Amino acid sequence: MIHEVDEVIKRLLEGGALSGSGIDISFEAPTRDWAARRNAPAVNAYLYDIREDAKRRQRGQASVRDERDVVVRRRRPPRWFRLSYLVTAWTKQPQDEHRLLSAVLATLLPRELLSPDELPGALGALGLSVPLTVAGLHTESRSLAEIWSALGGELKPSIDLVITAPFPAYPEYDVGPPVTEGAVRLRGMDGTLDGSPERSHRRRQPIPAQNTGERQQ
C-alpha cells in the first residue's frame, strides 16, 4: 500500500501548481550524497514515519457482497496507518525553493480527502476515502531537528504531509452459499424417531424486484 500512496502524492504534485514545470518528484532520503548528485530542481517527499492510527481501529468482521447483494466473503476491518512525509524543495536559490514550497501548498491544501476513485490498485479497491493533512501540528515522536541530524544534512524549510491510509487486515475468507433445502423429522410421543418419515423443506429464493413500478405480492 505504501507504494500506492507514493503514486498518489506524485500524481497530485505533478498535476497541480507544478504542472508542466518539469520539476522532479523524488522519494529518496534527502541525504548529503543525494543533494550532491542532484543537478536539477526537485521536490522531495521523504517518508520518515509510519505508525498506526489506533483511534480508527475497529473490531468484528465486515461482509463483502456481490452484484446480487449476496454475502460472498467476510473480512476484518482494515487497519489505518499514518504515513508522514517530509516535503522539501531543492534548487540553487532559497527564493526558488520558497516558490516551490508555495506551489506545493497551493496544490495540497484543497485536498483534505481523497475519494476511492482517485486511489490506485488495492488501495482504491477498498472503497474508502483517505484523509490528507498538510503542515499540521507535528505530533510524531521524532523532532524535525532529529530527522535532519539522522540524514546528515542541514535543516531546511519543509512541509509535513500526513496521509492516513487503510491497510487490509487478513485473513479474508469465502462464505458458503445460503441454505435453500433441509430435512425435518418429528419425534413420537415416546421421544423416539422410530417410524418418523423425513420431510424435506425447500426454501424459496427471493425473486429480484423488477423495475416496473409495481410492488411484489
Image (spheres, rainbow, N blue to C red):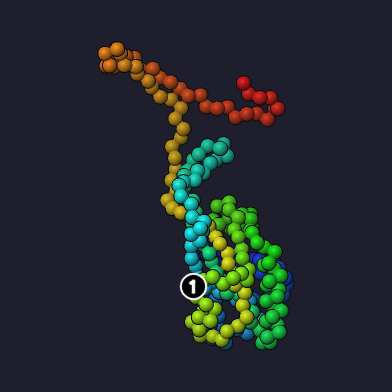
Residue 11 location in percent, x, y?
64, 66
Instruction: Name the residue located 70 percent from the left edge and 64 percent from the top edge.
Output: 110
Asked whether residue 109 is in view, the answer is yes
Residue 28 location in percent, x, y?
54, 76
The amino acid on which the numbered mark 1 sits, given as a three-letter code, is Ser
Instruction: Name the residue located 52 percent from the left edge and 77 percent from the top edge.
Output: 143
Lateral position of residue 139 relative to residue 183, left or right:
right
Neighbor class of circle 1 (other Cα within 10 Å; few <14, some 14-19, many 20+) is few
Lateral position of residue 141 relative to residue 137, left or right:
left
Residue 106 location in percent, x, y?
71, 70
Compared to residue 42, the image places residue 1 above or below, namely above
Q: Give the structural element (helix, strand or loop) at label 1.
A: loop
Lateral position of residue 3 relative to residue 12, left or right:
left
Asked whether residue 45 is in view, the answer is no
Task: Count numbered badges in the picture.
Answer: 1
User: Toward which corner of the image does residue 69 lie, by quadrant?
Assistant: top right
User: Toward which corner of the image does residue 121 lie, by quadrant?
Assistant: bottom right
Residue 212 location in percent, x, y?
70, 27
Instruction: Tell me the quarter of the image containing the C terminus.
Output: top right
- Residue under circle 1? 141
Name the residue nearer the viewer: 120 or 147: 147
Compared to residue 185, the image places residue 32 above or below, namely below
Instruction: Name the residue located 48 percent from the left edge and 82 percent from the top edge.
Output: 150
Instruction: Name the residue located 71 percent from the left edge and 84 percent from the top edge.
Output: 95
